[in-house]
Amino acid sequence: MVDVIRTIDLYGPFWLLSSVWIVLAGGVALLAGRRGLNPFLWFVVGLVASPLATLILLALITPRGGGHPPA
């Protein structure tokens, strides 16, 4: 039982941070989908690079008039 508690203490912050990272990458994918871009591609890039960096990149490449709605 002590080993289980030690393992949870060791990996607890890692799993919490990983969960937040995945949720933020999913948010970037949803935003990209609303702007008419491929959400799966943006989700993968967000997971690999950084959700914050992909959010900034998404804001820079989207036209000022807004994105194109999906057909």
Image (spheres, rainbow, N blue to C red):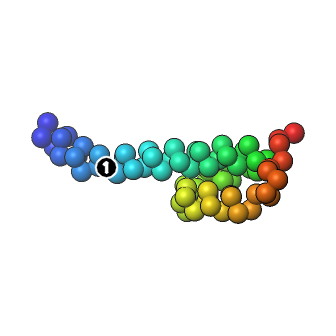
Q: Is residue 39 visible?
A: no
Q: Which sits in the foreground, 56 or 5? A: 56
Q: Which sits in the foreground, 47 or 51? A: 51
Task: Determine whether, in the image, residue 60 is placed left or right of residue 2.
Answer: right
**Quarter holding residue 57:** bottom right
Q: At which x and y percent is residue 2? A: 12, 40
Number of numbered discs on residues = 1
| Residue sitting farthest toward the left | 2
Quarter of the image with the N terminus in it: top left
Q: Is residue 60 above or below residue 18?
A: below
Question: Circle 1: is it few (<14), some (14-19), or many (20+) Cα within 10 Å?
Answer: few
Q: At which x and y percent is residue 9? A: 22, 46
Quarter of the image with the C terminus in it: top right
Which residue is depicted at the point 44% across and 44% down?
A: 19
At mark 1, the secondary structure is helix
Q: At which x and y percent is residue 58? A: 68, 58
Which residue in the structure is indicated by mark 1?
13
Q: At which x and y percent is residue 38? A: 74, 50
Which residue is depicted at the point 55% across and 58% down?
A: 52
Q: Say what amino acid the circle numbered 1 marks.
A: Pro
| Residue sitting farthest toward the front | 65
Task: Determine whether, in the image, residue 9 is placed left or right of residue 41.
Answer: left
